[in-house]
Amino acid sequence: MSKYLVIVESPAKVKTIKKFLGSNYEVEASNGHVRDFPKSQFGIDVENDFEPKYITIRGKGELLAKLRKAAKKADKIYLATDPDREGEAISWHLMQALKEDPKKMHRITFNEITKTAVKSSIKQARDLNMDLVDAQQTRRMLDRMVGYTISPLLWAKVKRGLSAGRVQSVALRIICDREEEINSFIPEEYWSLEGEFKVEGERKPLVAKFYGADKKIEIHTKEEMDQILKNLENAEFEIAEVKKGERIKNAPLPFTTSTLQQEASKTLNFSTQKTMRLAQQLYEGIDIKGQGTVGIISYLRTDSTRISEEADTAARAYISEQFGEPYLSAAEKTSKNSQKIQDAHEAIRPTDISRTPALLKESLSRDQFRLYQLIWKRFAASRMAPARYETTSVKIHGGDYVFTVSASKVIFDGFLSVYTDEEDSKKGNVLSQSLEKGMKLKLNTLKPEQHFTQPPAHYTEASLVKTMEELGIGRPSTYAPTITTIISRRYVSKEQKNLYVTELGEVVNNIMKQAFPSIVDVNFTATMEGLLDCVEAGTVQWKTVVRNFYPDLKNDVDAAEKELEKVDIQDEVTDVICENCGRNMVIKYGPHGRFLACPGFPECKNTKPYYEKIGVACPKCGKEIVLKKTKKGRKYYGCENNPECDFMSWQKPSDKKCPVCGSYMIEKGNKLVCSQETCGYVEQKAKEEK
């Protein structure tokens, strides 16, 4: 009979761990959390010093009965949930739910699902870390307080089914703020100039960029460019300086959750959710031919770049053998950002570096293979020597001006032999060896080019994760679910890789900014994350955080209930007549934003898209311009006469014409800008009368 019971979170781990531990051990899975707050109640007893009320999650009763039965028979119970705050909290909930003697229960953690790691974790069994449990419990309570007090307000004021979350509301605000920046961005003109020179004895021309004189000259207008071209008309060109040097490019650090999500998005086009799902599979175990099921990467939720001594030693031995001593890095680098690193964790790495992607290709799906290859290459590269480049920079004098050209070539590939990013793979200039100081050059041609500054880019999942990490919002385990939530709620739409705010997202963000400024304040949210870290470190009591947070939130909610009556969104009656029953149709909110519906529902179920007229005539055909939405909810302006007229604009058109070129103007913040970028006319928008 089994003497010991091991409880893990995921059923996928059961078989693997059972195989490592042998017949004396029974291994069961809890399938994640077993207890949580009730869905139908607040679940926090505010009157009784914020005592949480937990119940068994619906559908988990049978599973818990099975676990209790197994626990009764066991001499020792090992709680082997994930090695982070949430895993610690799940273990604590299991302890409460199993109702066994606490002395029988032990907490074990392993960073990877390998025989060595699992067996040594049993030897290092410990008591539950209540600071970790409290930190997770506090996060759950703060999220509950925000969700349960603010969401009903959104239902009352906008539509049912909306939700507000502590971290998701800030993520939405970050995207909305970027959208505002883009919408109010006014392009500025600038020019660049390239010179193409003939080098004696060389077939290929030398292409150099205009730099300026003693210092860099920015060229803003065509007039400035024409003046420079005029000054260069009879100039003689010669090489004033040829400078050789060397630069090094250091190897990247191994992956954290955030950097893995960013890189997988950039190079593999994976969403954050897909990356985490695949990484979870690689961590929990892959059936490898001849070896059975084994975890092939270390734990995937981490913000540490640390690597264990054993893994480091194994990697160095592998690199030395496969690539040679010169390819080994001198010493381990660590990330500067150490304020929130849970140092019990390691970076994400292969559990065995000798399991190369090529060896595992047969055992992995295509996407699993691509992600594993990315993790393997990044980890191998992190233990390798920097790449070394020989650099050459050339200065060319012509009249009063200087042109420059630079190039670099790899003289030692170092870590680049296994891992290159987009930047490394771009082909650089190759300069002729015959270039020398004092050499005369013949000018073939000058190529002036007009450019316009570009607005900030829309957020992608990768850049949003990077921003959230830099601002200290959320933690490794929260990035993917936060982004998934705001997309599934239709606050944000994803087109290609870009994230755009929908009409619904704008309404929710505006209500949150108006009524709950602190909830959507980036600094406030980052401070809360810092406080949770203090709870984890044992320096702050968890109830202190909750006691300070709730009263302010309650005051805001009470004030908002009174205030937000002003923004009560009534069904606005329109002059559009329902062709089925003759009633005037009304404007309603749906999951995609506003639409027209017959007020005779449920007898009459007629609906139509709602296009809001903006009071501006179409510049192409003279009919009305209306506000429309793409299938995914992104706003744009188009002609009501579509498809006959194909006019569309992402920016709101104005009825004012440009006094310089006659094109229609568009609104950008508090300015009107000519829609023809090459015109560049800008004027202040007239203040609207209240």
Image (cartoon, helix red, strand yellow):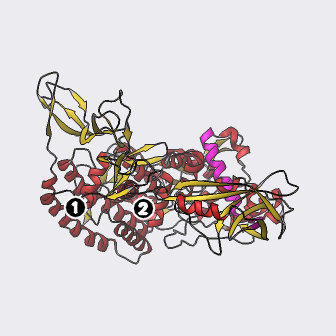
Asked if residue 359 lies in the magenta stretch, the reply is no
Total tally of numbered discs in the picture: 2
x, y percent for residue 522: 37, 66
Numbered badge on residue 474: 2
Q: Is residue 639 above or below residue 368?
A: above
x, y percent for residue 608: 24, 30
Q: Which residue is mark 1?
A: 515
Numbered badge on residue 93: none
x, y percent for residue 318: 78, 58
**Alpha carbon of mark 1 to alpha carbon of mark 2: how far?**
22 Å
Q: Nearer the viewer, residue 455 or 114?
A: 455
Q: Residue furthest right?
A: 201
Mark 1 touches mark 2? (CB < 8 Å)? no
Q: Which badge, 1 or 2, is on the more N-terminal residue?
A: 2
Asked if residue 386 lies in the magenta stretch, the reply is yes
Q: Nearer the viewer, residue 31 or 485?
A: 485
> Looking at the image, which residue is at 42% across and 51% down?
483
> Looking at the image, which residue is at 62% across and 55% down?
448
* Left or right of 289 on screen, residue 170: left
- Magenta highlight range: 366-395
The amino acid marked with disc number 1 is Ala
**Element type at marker 1?**
helix
